[in-house]
Amino acid sequence: MKQALRCTALATAVSASTAMAADEVRDQFYWLGEINKATLVINTDEGLLNVEDAPKFAKAIQAVIDQGNQPGGKRPAAVIRFEPLLIEEAGPEITLLHAGRSSQDMHATYRAAILRDDLLTLAQQLHDTSKTLVDLAEKHAETVVPNYTNGVAAQPNSYGHYLLGHAAGLSRDAQRIQQTYDRINRSAMGTTVLNGTRWPLNRERMSDYLGFAKPVENAYDASQISSMEHPVEVGSIVTSIGLHTGHFVEDLLTQYAQPRPWILLQEGGDNTYVSSAMPQKRNPGLLNNTRSSASTAVSLALGPVIQAHNITPGMVDPKNVKTNSTMVASGTTALKNWDKVLKALVISQERALEELNSDWTASQELADELMQRHLLPFRTGHHFASEVTSYAKANNIKPLDFPYSEAQRIYAEIVQGTNYPQTLPMTEVEFRNALNPQSIVESRATAGGPQLSEMQRMLVSSREALARDQVWITQSRQAIDQAQQKLNTDFSKYLQ
């Protein structure tokens, strides 16, 4: 009866300890504890550690972990500082756990474990920001606005189509995260410094207990090569995210230079603020902060490349956990800020159409229609559209007000002496429709274009991709959590 009560109490204590571990930060100390737990279980089961010593060592490991979880408790990040705590609890005999281990493979393992956690946090925010983009794209599937190239109004487009373009860029970032995660999700444990050990360690089981997909195959690669390239590869993802964020924000900031922008931030809160000197100004604080966070992400993401440059294999320069976690977190911050921007946007469709109709962003449609319907060479039609635009700007004529008679005159001068029809083959109705931004967007036939049928198809495709990404994030986290639960269950048997 007493034994049963002791077992029940112990199980409760282990359960509480496990719950505490689930809530704590999975830092270097945490993973050193898990590595020691797994080493004890595996090496005892494999006959590399005397079963009589296991309970004493298990209690020492748990004691060090519990003390470290207390407010102000010691949480060393290095093997050489963690091990003395174990010795204090169980004497030097506990260093038998160190058979076939090195700080090299242990540190490489916890760096990979922490970096994969950081990647999953980044992936979740990337998913959330992408979902906001797609939701907004659906809302504005038929909102016609100007799009710009070289900083100049270029063509009319659906704002939803524009947003889905940005979402496509983030979708590739999500793919990069998953591919990189697969390469990082490998256990270096059991490779020691660089060429393994004479101890017949069960590397597969160690990998499973720590939630890795599999061990790193080559022992030299484990801590000398791959652990140096991991932060560099993650940095490339953060760079891409920072660039995508910055491109979107810069496009918005150009609107704030206009007297009457068609897209703004909802005023107030953290979105905008009144200039301290000029009462008419509403400075886009949120855009400035988002741009700055994107620049910070790109700056920090370049760090691992510089640190890994011109050093011999295995050096610690690019491996600092805090530095690399800060780098990944900067990408998460940029995405969070971008998400806030998207949720604060105020779009005036009327003002967007006014801007479109005040410029000649629809002029290419004249050349396209002349070629498609009337077989006029594109360059000839382009010349006609260009001359119409030049005449209109010289005489301050807007597209919808352009005299059809002037279009006929310009066309006749261009084709004079050629074999092409000598009178403008477009009717006045066709001419007007070709310059109507809404008609242009609605008439697009390109796969992947802004027409409503394609928008609906791409929205479905985008949501399916988002759903797959969320499943991957959830399953990846569950794989780690389930491995930890299995380890704690098996470890608890040695605490009795």
Image: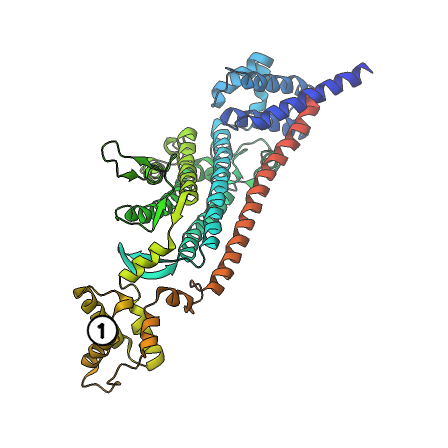
Q: Position of residue 427 (x, y in %)?
A: 32, 79
Q: Nearer the viewer, residue 275 or 284?
A: 275
Query: Extreme left residue here?
Result: 394
Three-letter amino acid code of the residue under disc 1: His
In the picture, measured across the screen, residue 386 lies left or right of residue 458, that is: left
- Does any portion of residue 366 appear in the rendered image? yes
Q: Nearer the viewer, residue 206 or 243?
A: 243
Residue 51 x %, y %? 69, 22
Q: Residues within 10 Å of mark 1 (few under 14, many from 20)?
A: some
Where's residue 84, x and y in %? 52, 15
- In this orientation, does residue 228 appear? no
Residue 417: x percent and y percent?
18, 86
Q: In the image, what residue occupies the spot 71% across and 22% down?
A: 11
Q: Is residue 88 above or below residue 472?
A: above
In the image shown, does 292 or 315 lie closer to the viewer? 292
Residue that badge 1 annotates: 383
Q: Residue at x 66, y 32 (%)?
A: 486
> In the rendered image, which quarter is residue 362 located in?
bottom left
Quick one: quadrant of the C terminus?
A: top right
- Quarter assignment of residue 432: bottom left
Quadrant in the picture for residue 15: top right
> Which scheme is used to colour this image of the protein?
rainbow
Is 182 displayed left or right of 251 in the figure?
right
Q: Which quadrant is home to the N terminus?
A: top right
- Mark 1, secondary structure of its residue: helix
Which residue is outermost to the right? 1
Image height of 232 relative to 67, above or below? below
Total marks placed: 1
